[in-house]
Amino acid sequence: MAEAGLIAIGASLAFGLSAIATAIAEKQIGAAAVGAMAEKEELFGKGLILTVIPETIVIFGLVVAILIIGMAG
Amino acid sequence: MLETERMSKITIAVSKIKQKSVIKTLHDLKVLHIVEHRKTEELDIGTPIGNSEKIAELLVKITSILSDSKEAISKEELNNIILAQSIIQNADFSLDEIETKVKEVETVIKEKKESISKIDASVSKKKELILKLDVLNSLYLNLESYKPFKSIICFVGTIKHKEGLKDKLEKVTSTFKLHTSQNCKDLVVALFVDRKKEKEALDVLKQYNFTELDLTFIEEMKGLPLSHITKLNSDIQKHIAEKNAIIKKIETIKSKNIEIMYQYKNFLSIEAEKAEAPLNFGQTKETVIITGWVPSKRVDKITEKLESITNNRIFIEPIAPDKHESVPIKLKNNLIVKPFEFFMNLYTLPKYKEIDPSFFIFLTFPIFFGFMLGDVGYGIVTLLLFLILKRLIPAAKDLLKAMMVCSFWSILFGFIFGEYFGFEYVKSHAWQTIIETLKLPLHKELIEGAKNEIVYEFPRLINRMHGEVNVLGNEINLVLVIGAIIGFFHINLSILLGFINELKGHGLKTAILARASWYVFEAGLALIVLKSLGIITASSYTNYIGIALLVISIVMIYLGEGAQGIIEIPSIFSNTLSYLRLGAVGLASVGLAVVINEKLAMPFMEKGGIFILISILILIVGHGINIALGIIGPFLHAIRLHYVEFFMRFYKGGGKPFKPFGANANNEEESE
């Protein structure tokens, strides 16, 4: 049982920390993108894309979390 | 479909006499993207035709009338009028007609506004009078009595308090009469005193913070103040009624004219566009030169039309564009793919020689979206939502059409995953009779646990969340694997498109070195992996072949793309892995749905009674939020997979849009 608990903590750390990392990255990109958009509205599309680029980090985090849970099974 | 519209550059030379009719024809045809003429020694910039200053002036006036009139009618009516305007195209007015009408409306509104301000002034004057009379009112004296007499003078005003006032006055004089009365906030005093003792009496009053009321307003008024107040009040009421009537009249004038004003505005903006068109032309003393881009297939038509309108007194010639000149881009897709051009406009249009990826976005974007939001219930809800939004926001029509295709795929994948609002099975006791009478072929399964329940599972092809019903240890990885496999094919398609683009742009050698090299790399890698996994078992085969292929491919990449290409090698792995999000985002969405259903709503539902209402509320709010997230998340991730991972290997973009003369925001459709 203790083992399962450790696995759950590991999975949640993998996911939670990568989510925080994504948030930090997106915070700065998002602010810059909004700034750029205020100057030139056509940049919305590119700004949106640049903002979601760090989203990959949290996806990897989720995948790793799922793999860790898979180890438990 | 994969190419953008082919364009031809033409130049038109015509006599100035015909300029106006040529401009009109071009405006009606809406096929010429005019290239701005730069002033040169031989060719000056054209001068505006017609009465462009007057048009501009009238436009300003009409816009101000319109912005003033917008409140006169309801928003719905306004939208209807604007909508009707976009349909009427060939309205024709003379400038004089417009000018008279505008002047008329302006003067009428101005007059009415003036009379309103007059009424306002008189009302505020009367209100002031009422305030003053109010002070006197509490004393109950006739207004005549305040008038100055030969020997008696009267002071009226307010004081702080009246203790000892009378005594102090008695010390000064014996001939006085003092009236005091408590008004709502002040102590009002009226002192009638002998004129000879005026100064002394005033000094006494001043000790009590006396503020004198100016009595000149009384003039010829007689009787008690109250009667005057009543009369003034009724006058004010009358004025307000008058004012309201005038306001109403103004509103009717505005709402009656708003439609014609919109017509004028549209007409005038078109006229202004036509009048200012020559600013982009070149001109000599007698002729104007117009240069621009026309879709190649339309060149004959535009030539024919212009020749017929000028009796062949026109010179039209195709000219070779400069090598580095950017050609305006018009995407050319059939009706089904067209909504997906939205994503190209959002990002950047392709260059003239590039492949237009709209078709590939049409192919894969909805599948990605559907794969992530694969739920029959969510698919239907979002489909209805997009349908309603399409009605409400005509501007976002294209995007919503594309999203409806996505919803369709959501429903389809919902069936594949066997998910209905996050439910993958129904409990036997509640649904048994329904299932048995309808003879639904649902799989019966036992959930082992504290309760040992029997459930009916919905049919499915792929397990996403529930697998063998318990959450831990199910086959959750399958969707992730499918995501990565989709990614592999998508990225290889991207390399293939890159190969075609390079072939067109830089020739076969670059195409092979910069793009086909990646296939060699993949092949080498695949051989090594297969060998080490023991799938290739032939004894004569060694790993050297795979390694040799890898080395060759890396050299090719270096020759094709330089050091940057070498740096990009790891990105092919991370990009493929990035497609894991196809499964992961879906898992997050279905996970939330399952939590809403099984952990939040169902426990309440089982309690029965009033708790059923609470659980229904939880279901509605929870799934509402999850659907909102389920639209935003999959949308962003799907579009990002295209913009980043897919476009990276073949797409550069940066094309300038084709903006034919005469096509404005109201009327983008090209007259075929």
Image (tube, coloured by chain):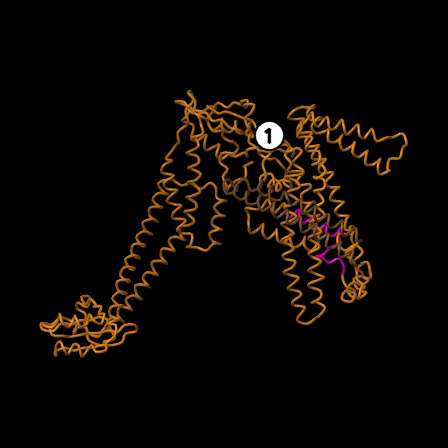
Chain colours: A brown, B orange
For disc 1, the chain is: B
The image quarter in which residue B3 lies: top right
Indicate left or right for B72 with B30 as reference: left
Residue at the spot x=67%, y=50% of the render? A17
Is residue B198 toward the left or the right of residue A49 in the image?
A: left
Q: Position of residue B24 (x, y in %)?
A: 45, 33
Q: Nearer the viewer, residue B595 or B59?
A: B595
Callout 1: SS: loop
Q: Main secondary structure of the magenta part?
A: helix
Residue B207 vertical position relative to residue B651 in the rendered view, above or below: below
Which quarter of the figure is the C terminus of chain B placed in? Answer: top right
Q: Is residue B433 magenta?
A: no
Instruction: Pinpoint residue B138: horizontal percent, then vertical percent.
Output: 25, 75
Question: Percent from the top left, x then y, of residue B518?
Answer: 73, 31
User: On the image, numbered disc 1 is attached to which residue?
Assistant: B352
Tell me the magenta residue range: B403-425
**Residue at 48% from the left image edge and 34% from the top image edge:** B27
